[in-house]
Image (cartoon, grey):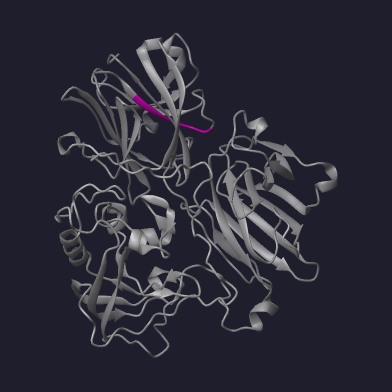
Amino acid sequence: MMRFHSISMAAFASAKLHLCLLVMLVLTISTSVTAAGECSNNFCDTTLDRFGDMMLRYKLNESDDTITMEVTYDGDAWVGLAFSDANESMAGSIAVIASSVASPQKYRLIDSTLPVESAFELMPPEEQTLVDASCELIDGQTVMKFTTQLLADETPFAISLGENHLLWAYGRDPTIGYHSNRSPFTLNLAKAAVVETNNNVDPIGTDIPTASPNDGALKVGDDVCITGYIMDSYCIDLGHFLDNTAIVTLRQPEEHSFHCLLDVPVCYNSGFNVLGEKDPQTGLHCLGYRIDDKEAVLAAGRAKGSNVKSDTHYACDTCSGGASAEVAGYRATVKGTIKELGDGTKSVTGQPLLTNIEMLDKSVVCDNPAPQTVCLSMDDVEQAPAQVPVSDSEPELEPVEETDESEQTPCSLDFCVPLNDAYFLAYTVNGDDTITMELTYDGNGWVGIAFSKDGLMAGSDAVIGSTETGIPQKYRLLAPSIVVKSAVQLMPPEEQTLTDATVEFIDGQTVMKFTKKMKEPNHIEIGLGNNIMLGAYGIIPT
């Protein structure tokens, strides 16, 4: 069955030049988020992007009700931090943007649009209220600093005590323009005095519950029995499901597809956990216990899951269950022995690790259920915020259309994206910060995909191949031109870093496959989140 990933795709151009088709798509691979809390005495640090290139440090200044913020990016590029509302939309947000050649100033974001000049506007002088604002290039890093006022009321697009919705972004170079990567995140702020008055309030404010391996209730060698949802560590850390970004991992594990859990290498290779029950105060499941036997989980889960298509979830290709088997929410009773207590952090690695694993049906009742793990305790939170909000431009996943069994086309990788009726993209995000892509064209022609920063051909990085040229190679796109040599430029040998790159003509289709680093020097970065790409093909191999 063809699987579709949540993307936004629009026709970009159609031309007779080389009898080719070019489309632009915004491919959402995923996003990440962090949250933090009481930071009145010292600076708090948080990593914003998956690669650790974008960092935020901040400190509450109680004497004058201000907050000092420091954004660091590993490179010479513009950086931005925007204050949004609960919708976490770009439109209407207030941003602080700067680079090594542009001092920090406040901007009003208008919308995600091209040209870039129409996407934001500089706020008037009377609203430029930042103090101690600077942006420097220090040891290869762009460092933006500023202090701004905390607002006690709930003024939209302003930072205040409590929950704040922000957006981060950075560009490819110091010239302020279209972002190379960006994502929303949530920041919870509280003064030290607030925390001291209630020792039950989690001072970190994170949405991930904490286990209690050192409170005397658990020790190494204890036998444990627990019934709960099985979840991979990758989706827990990501905050949402890899195949459905609209669902928060710890809030609705019953919606986690067997496909995401058991088919996708980046998920099952990250390790498995059996979650605790839901904390009624936050609506989030406790993290529970780690499982050290991946193969036991895979064997039990694949025997339980359905390999038949579903109207609501992706099919599990490695499962052996029939049409009546489960498609989502793998719940089981797990028996094991505590091998280690965890590192005590507020994360997956802080939870006890079980060994000597027995995977049993969820109907099996534990004689002595495992001690409940400690969950987030925040009396003033009625509903925990989504760990990874959905992009405001992302459409909802559509149910898979009903087709005859003979018409089902298997997806060769983890996710498939239809570019048009004759052109398909499949991809897998690997655990080593690479991405494997496969482009399939119904015919014998050249095929290509380009990674863009602004939706334009000029300046994009492309991978192009055909059965005539042999292996796929990387090109830099210059500008649309009738003279092909003026439109593309082959990258030098030291930048030809693709691996497992092939182009074949198979059963009437041109199939190009390659693995690419998601981040390379002097290349447009492929990040978790929205990525602008251009897909193209010609109807002949030349």
Q: Is residue 469 magenta?
A: no
Expressed as whole percent of the image width and height from the top left, the position of residue 78 reads: 63, 41
Q: Nearer the viewer, residue 129 or 363?
A: 363
Q: Identify whether 27 is placed above or below 63.
A: above
Predominant SS along the magenta part: strand
Expressed as whole percent of the image width and height from the top left, the position of residue 102 reads: 71, 40
Q: Quadrant of residue 502?
A: top left
Q: Nearer the viewer, residue 465 or 141?
A: 465
Q: Residue furthest bottom?
A: 216
**Residue 175 in the figure: left or right of residue 47:** right
Q: Nearer the viewer, residue 526 or 418?
A: 418
Which residue is located at x 85 percent, y 46 percent?
126
Q: Residue furthest right?
A: 126
Expressed as whole percent of the image width and height from the top left, the position of residue 167 reads: 59, 50
The answer to whether residue 140 of the structure is visible from this angle is: no
**Can you say which quadrant of the picture contains the C terminus?**
top left
**Can you say which quadrant of the picture contains the N terminus?**
top left
**Residue 379 in the figure: left or right of residue 227:** right
Expressed as whole percent of the image width and height from the top left, the position of residue 103 reads: 74, 43
Q: Quadrant of residue 253?
A: bottom left
Q: Which residues are magenta?
A: 448-453
